[in-house]
Image (spheres, rainbow, N blue to C red):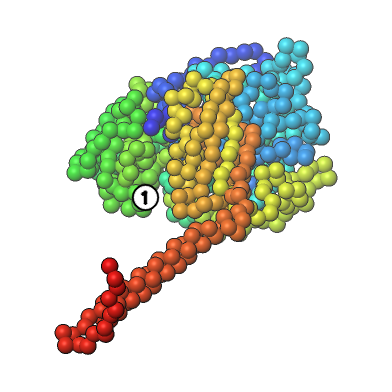
Amino acid sequence: MARALLIQLFTFTILLIVQSSPSTSLLLRPPHGGPRQSMLLPLFLSPPNPRRHLQRSDPQTHSNARMGLYDDLLRNGYYTTRLWIGTPPQMFALIVDTGSTVTYVPCSTCEQCGRHQDPKFEPELSSTYQPLQCNLDCNCDSEKVHCVYDRQYAEMSSSSGVLAEDVLSFGNSSELRPQRAVFGCENQETGDLYSQRADGIMGLGRGDLSIVDQLVEKGLISDSFSLCYGGMDIGGGAMVLGGISPPIDMVFTQSDPVRSPYYNIDLKEIHVAGKQLMLNPIVFDGRHGTVLDSGTTYAYFPEPVFIAFKDAIMKELDSIQKIRGPDPNFNDICFSGAGSDVSELSKTFPVVDMVFGNGQKLSLSPENYLFRHSRVRGAYCLGIFQNGKDPTTLLGGIIVRNTLVMYDREHSKIGFWKTNCSELWERLQISGAPPQMPSAPDREPPPTTAPTQVPDHVLQGELQIKQITCDMLLNVSYPNLKPHITELAEFIAYDLGINSSQVRLMNFTPNGNDSLIRLAIFPAGSSDYFSNATANSIIAQFAEHHVQLPGTFGSYQLVGWNIEPLEKRTWWQQNYLVVFLAVVVTIIIGLSAFGMWFIWRHRQQMLNAYKPVNAAVPEQELQPI
C-alpha cells in the first residue's frame, strides 16, 4: 500500500510576519519529496521576549488547561485537540504544532477552503468576535481596515485571512476559564491545508501570536506547556497549557531560545544497545541544531548521524530477516519476524539512548524509532531517515510516543518522562475533571451536558438491519482517487473494527473537484443482521468523523445514509425450514414404518405358503376346460 495512503506527514510551521514593511524569509525544504515532506523551517530568528523571563512562577499558583489529544501520528500525520471559539462556542479540531506561532480556523466567508472535520467558524454568530483593526504593527488589507496574514509554503500550499480576537474555551477539564485571544480567521487555503481533515492549527511555538505566549502575557498560566502522545497502537494522548509539577524522574535538557526560534535540545550523543556512535557532538548542532517538532511525524538525522545509526541498528539485527518496504518508491529499511505485540519488541530490537549535554539520557524503546509495515504482519521499518544534505537534526513525534514532554519555556529547558499517555492523569496523580468554574456573564463555556435533541444519525426503536448504505463526499479529485479506490474499503473497515469483506464500494463518481462514493456495510458472515446499537455506532462514526482516512483521500462529509431493515417475515417464512424438516422427518419415519410392515407381512405370507410333504391337502374341485 502506498506510503501516501498510509501516512500523511502534516506539519505546517508558520511564519507570520507582523511588521509594517514586508520582509522575506527563506524556507528549508523537507528532506524528502512526496509524502515524506514534513516540515518547513523559516530561516528567520526572532529575538526572545525579555518580559517573559521576568515572570517567574510556581505552577501551583496558576491555572492550567488540560486537554485531550486525538487522531494518530502515523495514520493521520498529526495529533489534534479540541478548541472552542466564540460566544456561544463553536468547536474545532486543531493540529497541535510546536513549530507554528498562530492558531487559525477557516471562516464562513472562505470560498476557497476545503471540507474539514467541523463546520467553518461563523463570526456573525459570535457576540464577542472582533477583527483586529489595521495598525502599524500588522500587515493590512487593501482597504487598510483589518490586519491580515498571508502564508506561502514550499509544498505549494497556502493560507490567508483576517486576524481577529474572540473568546477561546479549552474544554470541561480545564481549570482555565475562557479567555480572549487573537487567532486567524481563514479566507483562503490551498494544497495540504485545503485537503486535510483537521480544521486548522493550534500554534504552540515561540511568538507573540502563539496561544501560549498570549496566555503567559496575561499572567494566566506559567510559561510552560506539555504534550503526551499515545503509543504505537493507541493514538490520542493529552496536553496541558500551563505548568505541572514534573515527575521526580523526568529527564531534562536545555533549550536555548536564542539559538533558534524553534524548540531545540542539547543533544550530544546517541547510543545503540549501549554502544556509543562514534560521532563528533558538533554534528548535532548544525544549522538549526536539534529541533523537537510536534508537527513532524518521523525523525530526520544529518547524513553522518543517519549512516552511523543505520549501521549500528543493522549490526544488532544481523540475524533478523530484511525485507522491502511497503512503498516501492522509498528505500525503507524493514525487518520481519518480530511479532505483532508491541510490548515484546524490545526482545528483538535494541534500546536507543539520546544523551544530553548535562549527562542525562532519554531511552527510546522500539516504538520510538519504528513504524509498522503496512503489508507484512509482524514487520517493522525504521522511522528515522536521512535529512538530505541539511545538517539540522529534526525529531518528530515518533521519538516521543508514550512520553510526556514538558516545554518549560520559563527555565529554558525541555523534560521527558516515559509513561503511558492514555493513563497520564492517573500516573501524575491528578484528579479527574476539576470543578466547573463559574463563567463570566458574557462568556459561555463549552457545553457540559448532552444535547437534548436526538442527533439526525441516531436510529429510533429496535430494528434488525441487514445493510447500511452511506454516501460520502471525499475532498479529493476523481482522477486522484481512482487508482486507490480498492484500498479505501480496507481503511474504512479497519477504522470501523470490522472485516474488510463487510464493506463494499457500490459506486464512485466525480462531483466537481470532489468525488462521491457509495458504500454498503453488511453484517458478519455468521449473522443475518446488525443490532440497532451496532448500526447506530457505525453511522455515528461516519457522521461524527471518527473514521480517520489517510490524507490522500482528503477530508470527507457524510451526505446521506440509509438502512435496509431485515424484512418482517410471516410465521411460515420464519419457520418454513423447521416445517420442511418436520415433514421430511415424518415422511422418512412413515416410509420406514411402512417398509418394516411390508417386510413383516411378506415374511408371514412366505411362512403360510410352506407345507410339509406329508401334510393333508384339501380337495379342490376340477373346473371344466
**Is residue 611 placed above or below 463 in the rendered structure?**
below
Where residue 7 sits, quadrant-wise, is top left
Residue 474 on image: x %, y %: 56, 29
Q: Which residue is drawn at 63% across and 40% down?
A: 562
Q: How many labels does the image show?
A: 1
Residue 296 on image: x %, y %: 46, 32
Residue 566 visible in image:
yes
In this image, 251 relative to 271: left or right? Answer: right
In this image, 163 relative to 420: left or right? Answer: right
Quarter of the image for the N terminus: give it. Answer: top left
**Is residue 22 placed above or below 186 in the rendered structure?**
above
- The secondary element bearing badge 1 is classed as helix
Residue 212 visible in image:
no
Residue 607 on image: x %, y %: 26, 81
Q: How crowded is mark 1: few (under 14 residues within 10 Å), some or many (20 or more)?
A: some
Q: Which of 164 and 258 is in front in this view?
A: 164
**Is residue 518 placed above or below 455 in the rendered structure?**
above
In this image, 117 relative to 250: left or right? Answer: right
Q: Which residue is drawn at 55% across and 14% down?
A: 24
Which residue is denoted by mark 1 in the rendering?
342
Residue 17 on image: x %, y %: 61, 20
Quarter of the image for the C terminus: give it. Answer: bottom left
Residue reaching furthest right?
441
Q: Residue at x 57, y 27 (%)?
A: 516
Q: Which of 23 and 99 is in front in this view?
A: 99
Q: Which of 45 and 406 is in front in this view?
A: 406
- Say what amino acid the circle numbered 1 marks: Val
Residue reaching furthest front?
624
Q: Which residue is drawn at 26% across and 85% down?
A: 618
